[in-house]
Image (spheres, coloured by chain):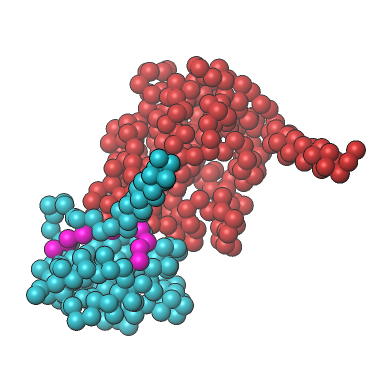
Chain colours: A red, B cyan
Amino acid sequence: MNLKSFINILVIAIVTSISNTNLALAKDIKSIDAGDTEIEIRIFPASGNVLLLGFPCDEGKSIAEEKTARSLAGDGIEVWMPDMLSGFMLPKVRSSLSNITTEALTSLINEATKTGKKVYLIASGPDTELVLRGASNWESLKQNTSLSGAILMFPRLFKETPVPGKAPEYQDAVGKTKLPILLLEGERTPNRWGINSLSHELQKNGSPVISKIIPNVRGYFFKRQDANRSEDVVTSQMAGLIKVSLFYLQENNTHD
Amino acid sequence: MIKSLSLFTLLFCFTLNMQAANLKPFTANTATPPLKLTDLQGKTHDLKDYRGQVVLLQFWATYCGPCRKEMPSMNNMIKKMGDTPFTILAVDMGETEAEVKQFVKEVKPEFSILMDESGKSISDWQVFAAPSNFIIDPTGKIRYTLFGGVEWDSDEIINKLKELAPI
């Protein structure tokens, strides 16, 4: 075996090992028929009556999300992390979101509600549009089971970058659901100043909306390579942050 | 043919780039919101007092990369505006005085930095991103807006602003 072949085999072994690590970390992998495609879900099972259905859309690459899911499952909150992008063979770019069908989102929600647990949805950044789109379609189908709420972390729901001095335009899914919503935003991002405007829009179809600002962190802090001390601390406590958010949603939930 | 296409592509990209850096005419039929804030030295600045001047009103933050990058060009802009009555008012978006003072020490802006820890002016002026800029003419009317970082000392911008000044 020459050096070039050895390096090739070594690279293949490392890549295989890395790609298998995500699967090994998850307790269970389930495939769901979602209309035109199959969606693979990493499931972190738990015995409690709460299920958190996330739309990370990161092909399972975020270590912070895996750790958070494990921690939540350890505290009795079941976590489902569907890999939407791979399901639709889409690249990890913002424009991919519009290619994820509403039917697929609804199928996932349907599957989650079959567990009989209280289902909460969660997403961050532009992925929050999927939560709102899925939830409003679920409600329009007049299902017997209601969703219990949604956590939108650092939502980025503008249609385009807002023009200074003008009210922003939001994605079509904004303001269509009745779902109780909790918004989380970092203190050190201009988006914190849009939180009141977004809350107002989200309430248009009857959603009760609570918003919380996390001190000393920027947007997407949990995905940053240059995270500062505050951001590292909050990232390590993400599970706690989500549990507090669920608590607020349960306190204000009129659906249950 | 390929040469012509390459030239066209180059020109197209250049045009797009220039458009991105352009001031956008402000078309909303709304009155100019009030603005009354204090600077880092404790002096109060009321936008009304700047009637007769062209004003660049900028909303920025220390954590905003483009804001930091463009400030030297804003210093140079003051020089390039020459005798034209012109002022820059840069409103920090809700940070503490300590954070802003540290930034000022590093970046050395040569214009007034106004503090708005409550965020009231940010709401009044409908600002949702940073940096957000407003160009106000000598009558107090908003004439242009611009979102994002830009080289403020470019001839294109300087000429547009000079056109707003009284002759």
Q: Residue at x 41, y 18 (%)?
A: A143
Q: Is residue A171 visible?
A: yes
Please tell me which residue lies in front, B41 or A36.
Answer: A36
Q: Residue furthest front?
A: B1
Against B157, is A28 above or below?
above
Quarter of the figure with the C terminus of chain B = bottom left
The answer to whether A26 appears left or right of A172 in the picture is right
Q: Residue at x 30, y 53 (%)?
A: B19
Q: Residue at x 29, y 80 (%)?
A: B79
The magenta segment is: B141-151
Q: Position of residue A103 (x, y in %)?
A: 44, 21
Q: Is residue A196 magenta?
A: no
Q: Residue at x 57, y 38 (%)?
A: A58
Please tell me which residue lies in front, A228 or B132.
Answer: B132
Q: Position of residue B96 (x, y in %)?
A: 41, 71
Please tell me which residue lies in front, A187 or B155.
Answer: B155
Instruction: Tell me which corner region of the image, top left, top right, bottom left or bottom right, holds residue B61.
Output: bottom left
The answer to whether A223 appears left or right of B104 in the picture is right
